[in-house]
Amino acid sequence: MPELEIIMGGYSINTDQTRLGLCTVTLIRGEVLSIVDVAHFGRRNMLVDELAAHGISTDDIGRVILTHAHWDHSQNTDLFPNAEIVIHADELEYSRNPRVGDLATARYFADTLLNQKVNAVSGETELEPGVRIIETPGHTRGHISVVVETDAGAVCIGGDAMSDAGAIGRGAPAIIFWSEADARASIQKIVAAANTIYPGHDRPFRVEPNGDITYLSESQTLEVSGVLHYASGAVTVKLGRADHPGTTVMPSAIDYQGGGQSHPGHC
């Protein structure tokens, strides 16, 4: 049966200067060596290095599955010249003309796929035995998640439809760009598909029968370096925690409330 490995962990950190959102990158060892999401340019070298640490070159990857077209998940597709790029047909269409206010979908995204083999899927799609796509819109128009049947049971690679473990309690992902109603329905769909979930910006976790959350790995480690050599005390890091982060509904979704996927993909 297929096996899963986290190549790069995902997390989201807010600071008073910027927001640092790094997506989960997951390897599926099945009939085809596949990777789910490919991160952004800032993690490009790390992605290559981490694959190498798992004994894999970028040429070995036969399938790239993009949960959605946002820049933090999709900027390194060109690293995989032999891969089929799997993306939802609605997401690909939308990416060519995103809504005003959607700054997470790069206007150049669709052009980056022109020289690659694209498999634009729709509906529930089995890619190979034990690996299937489910539609989980809301965070974006054509968001997809991946359900993998492993020896330990079903696992859902949720992408940003299930951004973090807190989405279970909120009933919604951290940020919504398309439709709040669709996003809430997708949370329920993911939980129905699998008890073990790999979220887009958090550690893998399991939803217990009583609804409790059990994390399946240790917390992430973030190293801060590159401070100017002669700038003594130039950076001070203060750590804090948001106990109950809410859901942010972006203007691109607020302006179109009431219909989810029935809306056009542009203004």
Image (cartoon, helix red, strand yellow):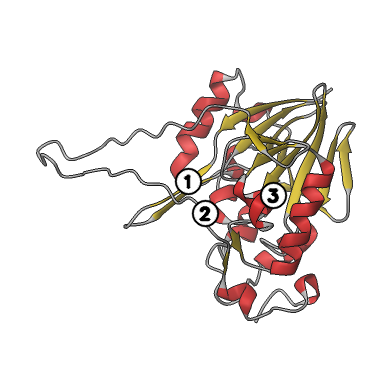
Foreground residue, 85 or 257?
Answer: 257
Return the mark for residue 41.
1
User: Crowding near pointer 3: few (<14 within 10 Å), some, many (20+)?
Assistant: many
Answer with mark 2 or mark 1, whichever residue precedes in sequence.
Answer: 1
Q: Secondary structure at mark 1?
A: helix
Residue tagged 3: 67
Q: Is residue 246 above or below residue 119?
A: below
Q: Quadrant of residue 157?
A: top right
Q: CA distance from mark 2 to mark 1?
A: 30 Å
Q: Is residue 36 above or below residue 221?
A: below
Q: CA distance from mark 3 to mark 2?
A: 26 Å
Q: What residue is rendered at 65% in x and 72% in y?
A: 97
Q: CA distance from mark 3 to mark 1?
A: 17 Å
Foreground residue, 245 or 85?
Answer: 245
In this rendering, would 230 be left or right of 161? left
| Residue 142 pos. (x, y %) | 74, 60
Q: What residue is rendered at 73% in x and 66% in y?
A: 93
Answer with mark 3 or mark 2, whichever residue precedes in sequence.
Answer: 3
